[in-house]
Amino acid sequence: MVGPSFTPRHLALAAVLGLALSACTVTDSLKGTLVATKDFLSSTTPGSWVTADGLVKADQKVNAFVTVNFENLTQDMAYGRGEYLTSLSELLGVSHDRRQAFFSYAQSRYQFVNRGRSGPSDLVALLTQDRPSASLQP
């Protein structure tokens, strides 16, 4: 027969193991975001994309959004749709009638981002270079 003090030890051990195992996925996600942010920020002049008030400059909103949401954006690119890709299309000024074409274009560029060496600035370049100008609002 198991004594009553033995059960709380099992619960405590299970809780510690559960936290340790779940921390791996959280740590990996956080690490990916931090690496992407560090890579992007190291390639820019400090303070070049924020105002003195700490707000993101209008011309740097795309860069900031892609930096913070890099992992989610690459997943949306793989699917060819999603809330992060939709938000990016808004920031880029893609008209609603051209949005599906933009999603297809982004999905066709996923292979270049998925190589593992790409970062936020590469993703911005891929999605803004050679993009048909018809997809932008006037």
Image: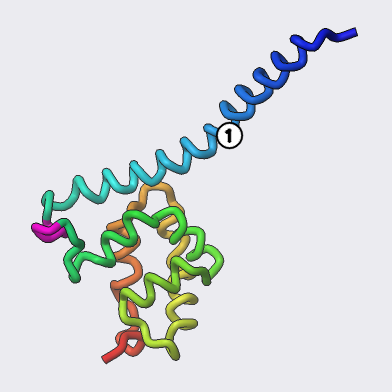
Give the vertical position of 6 relative to 83 (above or below): above
Image quarter of the C terminus: bottom left
**In this rendering, would 82 be left or right of 87?**
right
Picture quadrant where residue 121 is located: bottom left
Specify start and end residues of the magenta stretch as a single range: 48-53
Q: Residue at x 46, y 43 (%)?
A: 29
**What x and y, as percent, mark residue 75?**
51, 59
**In this rendering, would 89 be left or right of 7?**
left
**In this rendering, would 34 be left or right of 2?**
left
* Frontmost residue, 12 versus 46: 12
User: Callout 1: helix, strand or loop?
Assistant: helix
Reading the image, the residue beneath label 1 is 22
**What x and y, as percent, mark residue 118?**
36, 52
**What x and y, as percent, mark residue 74?**
45, 59
Give the vertical position of 25 relative to 52 (above or below): above
Q: Residues within 10 Å of mark 1 (few under 14, many from 20)?
A: few
Give the vertical position of 87 relative to 75 (above or below): below
**What x and y, as percent, mark residue 115?**
43, 51
Q: Amino acid at mark 1?
A: Ser
Q: Is 110 inside the magenta-drawn segment?
A: no
Q: Residue at x 36, y 77 (%)?
A: 90
SS majority, magenta? loop
Q: Residue at x 44, y 82 (%)?
A: 99
